[in-house]
Amino acid sequence: MSSKKHIVDYLTETRDRGGSDLHITGGAPPACRVNGTLEALTEFDITPDEAKELVMGVLSESQRARLEEDLELDFSISIKNVGRFRANAHYVRGSIEGAFRYIPTEIPELSQLGHGQSVNDLCSLRQGLILVTGVTGAGKTTTIASMIQKILKERSCVAVTIEDPIEYVYDHGYGLVKQRELGPDTHSFSNALRSSLRQDPDIIVVSELRDLETIRTAITAAETGHLVISTLHTIDAPKSLDRMIDVFPADQQEMIITQLANCLQAVVSQRLITRQDLPGRVMASEIMRINHGIRACMIERKFEQIVGLIQIGSQEGMHTIDESLAHLLVNRHISLNDALLNCRDEEYIHQNFKAVEASTKA
């Protein structure tokens, strides 16, 4: 049995189910991811030809040409009365398939995402580098969108974003925002980043620090009085420092560490974990603000000491991932098993769990 549904039908159903992603795959039913779990949208498989037809149906001629040349394509689409989606088309065993990420029209407030005052305070910074890190699907883009929205609502500034592709669309607010997309608007992150320095920006947003040149230019921009906000695919704050530095050749690393120690303001690492008390997921986070102690550890490359400094930095708005997980566990938002899967120190999590058990029995 086959279906003559259009891709719009599947995208609409994904949104209506509260799904985050739609997957179009040959030899399987169209499926959407709801709270991290895949749900089939039909009872039957679609053929590779049907998958190709569904995905190609939303591409322009130029996008089709790029897909055929590069064998993969990042793009975004906006569908009236349905919403906006970030998408990736790609070849699998010679056939074309696609993944579509739903982007809500409304940008959530930071508090709705699960962030506290610490991340709100970062929005007041006027210069330096802020990194938002986590695995794919951890909500990094949404956190940055929420930060930019807050800044544009509160102060007169020029924000330049460099995205692949554009996801959330911002209102200018009190300032001006220029959203540039890789492909239609620029050939590379590093080129767009260098060009942005001549566009009188106060804030520069780079959707991802992917390569040496982009990282180098972002650090330079942060050193020269701009607020630069970007993402990295790392699981915690210390690993983010490792990643930034290890991209560079050994003979350049000492200089990059010094530059990074001078311009880095904060690292916000986040994960989304399935809730046990309600449907959906909840955010666990780690926040590192750069102070004298952490700066000294960076320069001396004593990254193993950084977690301890985050633990004693609560007065400066810092907390570790384990402290965040323990808070969620104590309030029964997540299970012990999920806390243990995501923690650094299992003993710390067990101690907090025992305290909850004891208070329940009392």
Image (cartoon, grey):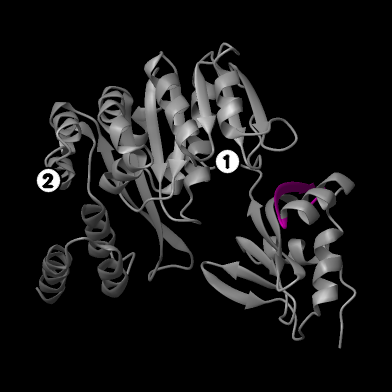
| x and y, in percent, of residue 167 in the image | 64, 42
The residue lying at 86 percent from left, 48 percent from top is 60
Could you tell which of marks 2 and 1 lies nearer the N-terminus?
1
Locate residue 1: give its quadrant. bottom right
Q: Check the picture and name the quadrant holding the C terminus.
A: bottom left
| x and y, in percent, of residue 321 in the image | 26, 53
Instruction: Kindly report the secondary structure that dominates the magenta region of the rendered protein.
Output: strand
Crowdedness near tag 1: few (<14), some (14–19) or many (≥20) residues, C-alpha within 10 Å = some
Please name the amino acid that badge 1 sits on. Ile
The residue lying at 55 percent from left, 25 percent from top is 193
In what element is the residue under mark 1? loop
Q: Is residue 143 left or right of residue 346?
A: right
The residue lying at 58 percent from left, 40 percent from top is 107
| x and y, in percent, of residue 227 in the image | 43, 22
The reply to whether residue 124 is visible in this rendering is: no
Which residue, given by chain and number where applicable, does mark 2 sit on?
Answer: 308
Which residue, given by chain and number where applicable, does mark 1 sit on?
Answer: 107
In what element is the residue under mark 2? helix
The reply to whether residue 40 is visible in this rendering is: yes
Q: Is residue 27 left or right of residue 326?
A: right
Range drawn in magenta: 71-82
Residue 48 higher or lower than 63, as above or below: below
